[in-house]
Amino acid sequence: MDTTPLGRRATRDGEEQLVLTRSFAAPIADVWAACTEPQRMERWIGTWSGDPAAGEVVFRMTAEGDDVPEEVYLVEACEPPRRLVVRSRDSAPFSADGSGPRVTWQHTLELTEAAGSTTLTFTQAVPDGPVGAALAGNVGPGWDYYLDRLAAAIGGADPDAILWEPYLERSDGYRDLFS
């Protein structure tokens, strides 16, 4: 597997962001559904419950095992089928072992459609300095992995056939983007 990060660094709305883009040979409504409907999301990343109209949902990652705790996400913007912005209600450690500084997760999903193809742009806010570099080294490979799982799910392939371990080789490249 190529160890080059597929994401990039960008400044958006005055914040440093990790930006990842993927294109799908699918209508925008299908990609939106795969990213927002609990049953479809469960195939590639996790599921949620609650009422988004009330401003928050409870999300649980299912692709990382059964013991992953639920997280509450505030729905800051939901403009189907084009834009979704969510932010974790509580800060959490960004490392799997629970060490390191606590951060608040902010994710933005934007979809555009042209000529039968849908482009997904996913962003995550990344703090400045060493914390941001460490965070990017942790979550960058993860988002590459999950977006590849999304592509498999949309394309009718088995997301579970995508192995996590090779993505870890991109950690240094993502850290370097934010160093």
Image (cartoon, grey):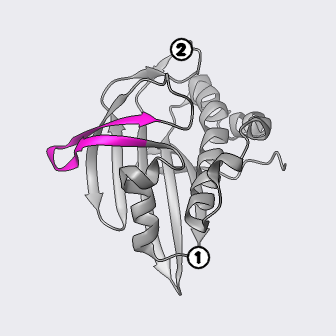
- The residue located at (49%, 50%) in the rendering is 123
Instruction: Return the residue at label 1.
Output: 25
Q: Secondary structure at mark 1?
A: loop
- Secondary structure mostly seen in the magenta stretch: strand
Q: Is residue 22 above or below residue 58?
A: below
Mark before the other along the chain sequence, 1 or 2: 1
Residue bearing mark 2: 98
Q: Quadrant of residue 155?
A: bottom right
Label 2 residue SS: loop
Determine if the magenta segment contains residue 73: no
Label 1 CA crowd tier, 10 Å (few <14, some 14–19, many 20+): some
Along the viewing direction, whichever of 9 and 91 lies nearer the viewer: 91
Point out residue 20 in the picture as x, y percentages from the top left corner: 59, 54
Query: Which range of residues does the magenta coloring cover?
Result: 47-61
Quadrant in the picture for the C terminus: top right
Q: Disc 1 or disc 2, which is closer to the eye? A: 1
* Residue at image point 51% right, 16% down: 101
Q: Is residue 92 above or below residue 83?
A: above
How far apart in space, not on screen, are marks 1 and 2 (Cα)?
A: 38 Å
> Residue drawn at (22%, 48%), measured in percent from left and top?
52
85 up-or-down from 90: above or below:
below
Residue 48 in magenta? yes
From the top left corner, tell me how far across and down residue 109 is, in percent. Answer: 43, 56
Q: Is residue 80 left or right of residue 141?
A: left
Count neighbours of disc 2 (C-alpha within 10 A) and say few if under 14, some if 14 to 19, many if 20 or more: few
> Is 119 in front, or is 38?
38
Q: Is residue 162 left or right of residue 129?
A: right
Please provide percent x and percent y for residue 51: 19, 45
Q: Which quarter of the picture shows residue 164?
A: top right
Residue flagged by tag 2: what amino acid is it?
Answer: Gly
